[in-house]
Amino acid sequence: MLEVLNSRVSDLDVLWVGQAGGMEARIVAAHDINFAAIRAGKFRRVHSRHIIKKIFDPTTIGLNARDSLRVVSGIYQSMGVIRRFKPDLIFIKGGYVGLPLGIAAGLLKVPYIIHESDLVPGLANRMLAKRAAAVAVGFPVDKYHDLPGNHLVYTGNPVRRELLDIDPAKAKRHFGLSAELPVILITGGSQGAREINELVVEALPKLIKQYQIIHLTGEHEIESVQFQVRRLSLSHPEHYQAHAFLTSDMGQALAAADVVVSRAGANTIAELALLEKPTVLIPNQTMAGHQVDNARMLARAGAARVISEDQLSPAVLERELATITGSKQEQDYLRQHLRQFAVPDADRRLAEEIMTVAHGAL
């Protein structure tokens, strides 16, 4: 998105506001973008069936009280940042870090745009949406019921368009894979997912007889997974490879895959839609419902097959993969319906909305 803005605005001045010490500070610095740090806190919900614990959980209450003070501090810090930088417009990409900045922008009457990737907005975006100049959303506007309809603009979720330039055959060779067996990419997201890792290890003896597996375990799980796999004495160990995570090679892995098994994060869905990859989604049920609703929407549209966490088993995974890989008609059906969620120019749409609001504020 910044590349699009830079190509159209000759004197663009950007300041990135985030938390100090996090990964974003290092990434921003690597791209020579100015960075300002503020304090922020998040509201924690208790995921429990017990109503007493849900309301009176002391740990959660204590952490929420502490973070409430951080939000207040962040608002004052944000007001200082805004007064110094004097922005024409503030862009907020969801998340709890954006809440104090958005509140400060409202108090100082500086226009702001927010972007909501998921189908169900997070708490910060729900609080900021009413005063936003525009609310850009990752899915078609008619799918949203918790945001002000007159503010919604369908931009999609920006993805790397260079994904389309990767040749699947070359990508398979890049990972040392053959063209004889289907390739299954299995990922639990950037941090990995223990439930998915345990499922893969249990199902692996049968899976590698029919498929080649690229398994992204997450950094904290890679050693455990590799240890468990070594104990299996697999009949075709060359059909399986585990990686903690992939950065520059992630596009290659997506291109190489014939089927993807994944969490249901909005950005992941955007990439899979762009590539029209037959997909099995396993939504994270602890993510305040965001992934569950994303997955449910795609399932209703015929765009993906979905396994809920409480249904996870090797037999269910094997059945879903066999249904997809055993039928070209099923693959074409999933591709066709997933295609409707692809927005290749989401970065341009979002940049144009930002420019429109910014020009109106001048």
Image (cartoon, helix red, strand yellow):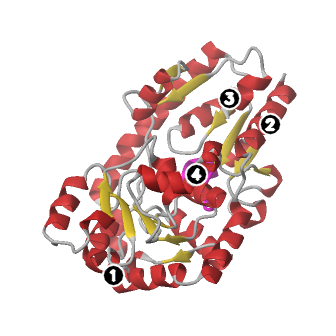
Q: Residue at x 44, y 67 (%)?
A: 184
Viewer-closest of 173 and 10: 173
Specify the quadrant of the image occupied by residue 109: top right
Q: Is residue 232 magenta?
A: no
Whichever of callouts 3 and 4 sits on the residue coming sooner in the sequence is 3
Whichever of callouts 1 and 4 sits on the residue coming sooner in the sequence is 4
Which amino acid, mark 1? Pro
* Residue labelled with disc 3: 3
The range drawn in magenta is 117-127
Helix, strand or loop status at disc 4: loop
Q: Is residue 287 above or below residue 198?
A: above
Q: Quadrant location of the C terminus?
A: top right
Which amino acid, mark 3? Glu
Which amino acid, mark 4? Asp
* Residue labelled with disc 2: 352
Real-space CA distance between mark 2 and mark 4, rounded to the nearest whole angstrom: 31 Å
Helix, strand or loop status at disc 2: helix
